[in-house]
Amino acid sequence: MPTHIPKPTIIQSTGNKPKLIEEFIGRVNSKTEAASIARMTSPSGWVEPGQTPEFDEYTLVLKGMLRVTFRDGSIDVGAGEAIIAYQGEWVQYSTPGADGAEYIAICLPAFSPDSVHRDS
């Protein structure tokens, strides 16, 4: 039988400013370990610590622009565009644009605080 997800769980964010994380599918909201799906809404000027996760992260930007910084540079991902960050590779997300960003993040396997390995 399918599982209906009537609403997300709000997850605590990291970074220099508050960011709204709405987990629809994942370890917290649906007890799913295979994948997580969350809608992110981050303000202008938001930056989170770098990370070297144990999961692949597939991101689709719905509004604004998401900057994805990696060891050799950065990529600005605009509305209607997507990016894949691969497990074991250092990455950092930010929203330097005036409008911030809204995006969907899918992690395989599901995101967990223990598997993200944020910079200290």
Image (cartoon, rainbow, N blue to C red):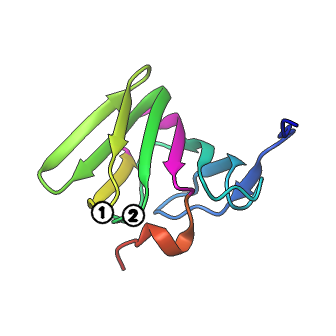
Q: Quadrant of residue 113?
A: bottom right
- Spatial CA span between label 2 and label 1: 6 Å
Name the mark on residue 88: 1
For the N terminus, give its image quadrant: top right
Q: Are there few (<14), some (14-19), or many (20+) residues within 10 Å of tag 2?
A: many
> Residue at coordinates 31% horizontally, 45% vertically from top-left?
68
Range covered by the magenta-colored residues: 95-110
Q: Are marks 2 and 1 in contact (CB under 8 Å)?
A: yes
Q: Which mark is residue 41?
A: none
The answer to whether residue 97 is visible is no
28 vs 97: above or below:
below
One can see residue 64 in this view: yes
The residue at which mark 2 appears reads as 53
Secondary structure of the residue carrying numbered label 1: loop
Horizontal side of residue 14 vs 3, given as left or right? left
Q: Which image quadrant: the C terminus?
A: bottom left
- Tell me which residue sits at (33%, 31%) in the image: 77
Residue 7: percent from left, percent from top: 83, 42
Q: Position of residue 86 (x, y in %)?
A: 32, 51
| Amino acid type, mark 2 | Pro
Q: Which one is nearer the viewer's eye here, 82 or 66?
A: 82
The image quarter containing residue 87 is bottom left
- Mark 2 element type: loop
Q: Does the magenta run of residues contain 3?
A: no
**Is 99 covered by the magenta stretch?**
yes
Q: Is residue 96 left or right of residue 19?
A: left
Going 53% across and 43% down the picture, which residue do you hit?
106
